[in-house]
Amino acid sequence: MSDDAILQLGGLLISIMGYQYPSNDDLWDGNWRVVRAELAAPRCRVERVGPFVRTTELAGFAEDQSSFSRLETESAKLDCLEASFSISGAREGSLGVMRFGVSLTPNIANQTHHVSFVGDISERTTLLEDIKRVNRHYRVWGERDA
C-alpha cells in the first residue's frame, strides 16, 4: 500500500486499494474504488472492505473542504451513494475547533455505527491535503456528476 492510498481523520483510517473495475473508464463503473475503512473509538472498532466510495464523491468532498477552508461554508460532508459510509465536519465556535462525524456500517441490514469527535482545524487541513493527494493518484473517469 502506498502513502498515496491513505486518508486519516481522528480514529478513521481509509486505505484506497484500487479501482473496482480498473479497465473501465466510464463515469459509472470506472469510478468505484475498493477501500478498507477502519473506524476506532473507545470501546468501538468497525471495519469495512469493498467498493463503497466513488472517485467523484471524494473529488466533490475535496471541493467542499476547499470552500470550507476559505470560510465560504460552515461545514463539509462526504455522502456516498452507498449508504454505509459518510463523513461530516463543521466548525464549532470561532477558535478553530471542529466537530467531525463518521458513519461506517459493514452490514446495513442490522447495524449502525456513528462516531463523533472533536478536533482542530489542522485535522481538516490534513484531510484536505490527503484527499487531494489521493485524487491525483486515482483520476475521475468520464464526466463529473451533474
Image: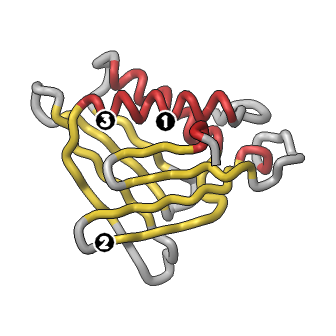
Circle 2 sits on which residue? 44
Percent of width and height locating residue 138? 69, 36
Quarter of the image for the C terminus: give it.
top right
The residue under the point 64% across, 41% down is: 55
| Whole-number angstrom distance, CA of label 2 to CA of label 3 | 21 Å
Circle 1 sits on which residue? 61
* Relative to 13, 101 lies left or right: left
The residue positioned farthest toward the top in the image shown: 70
The residue under the point 76% across, 47% down is: 28
16, above or below 45, in the image: above
* Relative to 34, 93 lies left or right: left
The secondary element bearing badge 2 is classed as strand
**Residue 123 image label:** 3
The secondary element bearing badge 1 is classed as helix
The residue under the point 60% across, 37% down is: 4
Dot 1 amino acid type: Phe
The residue positioned farthest toward the right in the image shown: 23
Residue nearest the viewer, comparing 71 with 100: 100
The residue under the point 48% across, 68% down is: 47
| Whole-number angstrom distance, CA of label 1 to CA of label 3 | 15 Å
> Mark 1 or mark 2: which comes first in sequence?
2
Quarter of the image holding residue 36?
A: bottom right
* Relative to 45, 43 lies left or right: left
